[in-house]
Each structure stands twice: as structure tokens, then as C-alpha cells.
Image: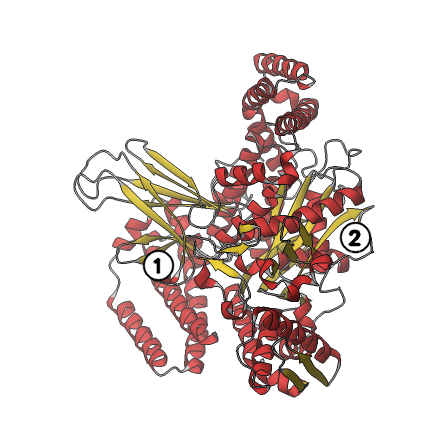
Amino acid sequence: MSVDLSLDYFALFGLPCRFRLDEATLDHAWHTLQTEVHPDRHAHLPDGSDRRNAMAGALRVNEAYTALKKPLTRAQYLLELAGMGSDVINANVMAPEYLFEQLQWREAVEEARGTNDIDALEQLALRLQIQKGGVVEQLAVQLDDQRDLDAAADTVRRMMFLDKLRQDIDNVLAAFDG
Amino acid sequence: MALLQIAEPGQSAAPHKHRLAVGIDLGTTNSLVATVRNGIAVCLTDEQGRAIMPSIVHYRDGGGIELGFDAMSTRVSDPRNTIVSVKRFMGRGIKDVTHIEAMPYVFEETPGMVRLRTVQGSKSPVEISAELLRALRKRAEASLGGELTGVVVTVPAYFDDAQRQATRDAARLAGLHVLRLLNEPTAAAVAYGLDNASEGVYAVFDLGGGTFDLSILKLTRGVFEVLATNGDTALGGDDFDHRLYCWALDHARIDPPSAEDARRLLMAARAVKELLTVCEEAPFRLRLDSGEEVDLTVTRADFFEMTRALVQKTLAPVKRALRDAGLSPRDVKGVVMVGGATRMPHIQRAVAEYFGQEPLTNLDPDRVVALGAAMQANALAGNRREDDSWLLLDVIPLSLGLETMGGLSEKVIARNATLPVARAQEFTTFKDGQTAMSFHIVQGERELVADCRSLARFELRGIPPMAAGAARIRVTFQVDADGLLSVSALEASTGVEASIHVKPSYGLTDDEIAGMLRSSLEHASDDLTARALREKQVEAERLLEACAQALAADSELLDEAERTTIDALIARLRQLVTGHDANALSDAIAALSRATEDFATRRMNRSLSKALTGHNIDEL
């Protein structure tokens, strides 16, 4: 097996290029590569090109890991490898039922935020988590089994919305913590 | 130097050469220095056998300073010139410092970092911290019998870029070679994890004298991965003292005290706090210079009541860190307590209640950070044994962003990204014919730039005039393993470039540091040229050593011509290394480094494939 830093993220970690992935396998491959290239491994050497090389390696390995770890970014990366950049994905027109779904979520979050209802927000976060699980499974089928990239791009857009919503809920909850 | 020592990364090329390296815990209240001796981390003590050095510097009238225990007595007699808790001022402006009204110092309104006016003139927190570091360096060199190769200095995980820069500058000013800035909770986790061979998710609850950190780490087979970190760099044991102080002023009906009396009251408050850790009640009794008497009794219940809000304040970062890590309190296998302030019983109870388990207190909370830093210093210096190869994967605590239209912060690197990390973002011009673009770099989670910390501003000039939106300006943020940021900007169509090592707003410039070094009496006798030559010689020796090793291991990766060039450059460097020409030596080092660059890349690729082969995919 030949591995170098110009490889795609999956090949870099010695993983098959597909959506379904075992997190423990990815973590272990990440640790194995960082053990080679992490700046801590080269701190005793003087400044110079080998440290720069290792730094470039460490940056690339972390970038690859970050992209593959989360289902959304992993799906986006697979689409990008297949020639569908983010501009193509974002240009897709959303089906009306998804837009309606988004509207309902937004209203629910706004209502809970308006009444400072932390329990309701936490409930929404939990429901969102469950829904996200379903969307991830759908992506696995579309990307790995059906190889239907257009459908996967739609699902990615749905997921982007769910992730953003989750972030908003977390921000509101974080404000309540303090 | 060009060659990766790939055979055993992190191992010394010549294991018999033990390099002297120490870990330094530069604390708000106390500082410590530790090293690894015969494979075991130990704190280094002063002549009286004390590991702790109070972080106190006294500037004497007429010159000279006293430090640590020797400066304790002047806290009351000369409060203005006896600086305690200087860490609270590192990388901070005057408006950021809490409880400034209870402090006896004369502050100076200077742009960027606050300064203190002492009898020996205006001092920056960086200079004051450097005094503490210099004392620890002396202690270490006396104890280890030689010059230090490098140090690891710990910082609160929640320190921002300005505070980290200030710490690094202080170490440089003290003549130390910083191998790494290490986050305090991570250092504690290393000491704890390696001691207990732990696996799983751990929380480190680190409440020091002036700072609070909460880190969530996952420990797997020798890898310490920080999942999330949060905290408050203006919350610590000092704040509990301050509550007691206010309570005493209130209950004893005392007029606003003089600087001397304020110091006295604060010291009494700390003694009361410490006593309440073991006793149910404590006397708060002292006579002030003003003639007023304080004669009060504080019960634990009183103390818990007056500090309840502070305890609550520690729980917010705990919740946020867990949420960022996507975990609940149940997922945490153990909570490691770090920092003297975690001795307070109501802190321990609050943590136990929140996590549903008793926190781990089996390591000395005052020493654990220094011990972990020593282990990391030992590894970074290249002293580690092959069977001792653990790895730290730490994160950036606060998001980094750029100011965009409307005073909003556009996040470029999100908090809790694993270090090192680089990210590029493209921007474009918004006016026709625009030839310059200014960037404002900020750190923090808030939407508005005004609510984030301003780190630096810089300009990219010389953009060729184009229609609005036609220029492509690529801004790259890179954060190294110390958590320090550098930023560069490049206009893609013309290659116009600007880069900045982020420091102007809060840090010191290199000139300022050089000036301080020159003026420092400590270094007046140091022959800077000789030092520079010695450093170059050490670098050359290491490079030669690494080359020999790399050639022995992987020379088949080179063709004949490449090999001849490298051999000739090695011979030249060998010749110069014993001479006295630092510049020629420096050039020869650079030449050999350049010539071996490709070789290093080939070796790295080979090593990476080696690392992954031998495990097939299912097994990984």
C-alpha cells in the first residue's frame, strides 16, 4: 500500500471510499498517522524543512479527519469527489415538503426561545438528534447502495439545515448556562 | 534540518545524550518546576526543600528584587511594589481585569496590555512573569547541573491568543527555549492517565488561583485526545478570597481600606478560606493600620452561601464543554480535580453532584500540572523511550474569525478544532478598483466583533484594480500546536501576499523583547554572539546526526547525483561546525536542509505507508 499526503482523505487513512464508516477504525488510523507527523514528534529537531514537512502532514491529516468524522462533511466530501461542489449542492431546489418541515422546526425553536423554555429546547434537540439519525441512514443508502448523487445532494441540504438548527439551539442553551 | 528521524519518531537519535528539559507550571498563586528523573516525574525544590514558589515579585526601592517566599513579607509593608497574581494581567487590557478596585497597584493606561508602575519604573506583566520564570530556571539548572535544552510552560486551556503570546514572550525574556505551551488540564490528564493506565472519557476540573478550565479528554491506547474545552480565565480561588473580603468589610463596617489594609484583609480572607476546608468555622480577626478592628467568625455555611454564585459559575463551562463534545455527564468515567481551589468542600460536592460520582483527588492538585508538563518536556526534548510513546491531541479553545461588513465576526476556525489546524477562506473586493483590503482578526464565540477579543489588524495592499467581486483573496489561518495563530492573505490572480504573526494588539514586538533582553542586568554579562554560535553548533550537530541516521536507513530513496550533493554538503558542514563563523555555519545548515527536503518528503511518505501497512483495513 502506498500512502502519501496528496491522496484523497479516504486513501490517506487506508479506508474504502464510501459513506458507511466505522468510527473506531477512523480514529485508530488518525492516531496512527498523527503518531508519525504530529509536531510533538519533531519538537526536538531544529527548525527546518523536516519540521515544516511534518507540520504540513499533521495539518493534512487533521483536515482529513475532520472532514470524515462527521456524516454531513463526509457526505459533502464524497459528493465533491464525484464532481459536485458546494455551489452545485446549494443550487438544488428544495422540495416543498422539506421547506415546510424546516418552517415548522424554526417556529418550534423560536417559540421555546421566546418563552425561555429550556426543557422544550432540550426536547427539540433530542428530536432533532433522532431525525438526524434517519437522515444519516438515508444518505448511506443513497451514496453507497443506490449511487444516486442527486438524491444524496438533496439529503445533504436537509442535513445542513438540521445541523444549523442544532447549532442555534446549542447557542441558546449555552447562553442559559451562564 | 531536513531529515525526519522516522525510524523512531520522537525518540532521541542518540539516546545516551539525555537532554535537560523541565515542565513549568506558571500559576496565579504558586509556580513549580518539574523534571523526569530516571523515568519518574519529580518536582524540583529550593534549598529548603520546598517545591512551591509563591508567584510574588517584590521590586525593592533602590534596585533589586525579591521573589517567592522571600517576597511574602512585603505584601503588606510594600503592597504597591509587591506583585501577586500577575497572571491575571497577562495579555489583558485594564478593562478586562476584575476586582481592580481591591488591588493596591498603580495601573498605567497603555494600549494593549496593562502595565504596573513600580518603584523601579513601569513593568509589563510579561517582564514580571519573566522574573518568576528566571528564578525557576535557576533552580532547575542548579538542580540538574547544566543548561536547559528546553521547557514546556503550561497555560490555562481557555487562554486566548494574546494571553498565550504573553506567556511565550515571558519565557523568551527569561532566556528559556519553549518546546511547547501546554494546556494545564491536558498536562494534568497526562500525569493522571500515565500513572493510572486509564482508558475512556475523563473530565479535568481545574480551578486554580485565578483561572478555571474544564477539559473533556478521551484516553485510548496512549493517545490523549481533547474532545472539548471551556473555562473562565477570570475565575479562581482569588475570587473566593475577594467575596470573604467584601463580606468582612460589610460586617465589620469598615471604611474603604488603605492599600496596606486591603492586602492584609485579603490575606486574612485566604487564611479563613483555607481553614474552612478542614474546620466548620474560622475566626476572621485582625487589627488594621487605621486602628479599626475586625473580629468576626465565619461558618462554613456562611462561606458556602456567599460563594454559591461562584460555584455555580464553574458549572456553566462544564455544561458547555460536555455539549460541545456531544456527551452527557453519565459518559464521563472519572473527574480529575486540579488546582488548590478544588480542595474546597463545596466545590467537590457540586462536582460530585453534577457528574453523579466522587471526583478523583488522589494526585496532589498543586503539583499534577507541573508533573504532566515535565513528562511532555521530556518527550519533546527527545528523551522518551520507545515503549513510552504517547501522543497529545489538543484543541483550540475559542473560535477565530475575521470582521466582515456590519461588524460581524465570520468564523474561520471553530473552537475545539484539533491542533495543528489550518483553514483558508476566500474573500473578494466590494468596490470597483479597490486596491487594498484590511483584515481584523478576532477571537471568541460572539456574533459581534465588539464582543470578541481583537487580536490583530493587517492590510493587503497592491491588489490590481478590478471590478468589484473579481479579486480572489485567500486568507489562511494557521494555529500551531501551542495554540498560536498566524495569518496570511494572498490575492490569487497576482500573487500579492501579506502575512502576519498575530501579536501587535496585545503582544510585544520582537524589538521590544530584544530591548528588554539588552536592558536586563541578568543578561548584560551574557555574550549574545557566543550564545548564537553555540546554538548554531548544536543545530548543526543535530542535523548531521539526523542525516547520518536517515542515510543509513533509507539511502536507496536517493539517486546518485542527489547523494553526491548531500555528501558534499555534509562534509562542508562538518568542517564549519568546529569553527567560529556563525553566519557561514547558518548558511551551511540551510543549504543541507534545502538539499535534503525532497528526501525528507519521500521518507515521510514511506513511513506513513509503513505505519498503515501491517494493519489491514478491517483491523485498523
Give how far across and how far down residue A77 sits, in percent.
Answer: 41, 49
Identified at 56% across, 56% down, the residue is A23
Give how far across and how far down residue B23 sits, in percent.
Answer: 69, 49
Q: Is residue B221 toward the left or the right of residue A147 in the image?
A: right
Which label was assigned to residue B568?
none
* Residue behind mark 2: B46
The answer to whether residue B620 is visible is: no
- Bin the neighbour count of mark 1 within 10 Å (Cα to Cα): few under 14, some 14-19, many 20 and up: many
User: Tag 1, which chain?
Assistant: B
Q: CA distance from mark 2 to mark 1?
A: 46 Å
Relative height, residue B565 to residue B60 (above, below): above
Give how far across and how far down residue B7 sits, in percent.
Answer: 69, 33
Relative height, residue B274 to residue B2 (above, below): below
Using the rendered image, report if marks 2 and 1 lie on a common chain: yes
Give how far across and how far down residue B468 sits, in percent.
Answer: 18, 43
Amino acid type for the residue under numbered disc 1: Val
Identified at 64% across, 37% down, the residue is B523
Relative height, residue B589 to residue A77 (above, below): above
Identified at 61% across, 73% down, the residue is B261
Circle count: 2
Element marked by disc 1: helix
User: Tag 2, which chain?
Assistant: B
Amino acid type for the residue under numbered disc 2: Asp
Q: Is residue A59 toward the left or the right of residue B252 in the image?
A: left
* Residue behind mark 1: B449
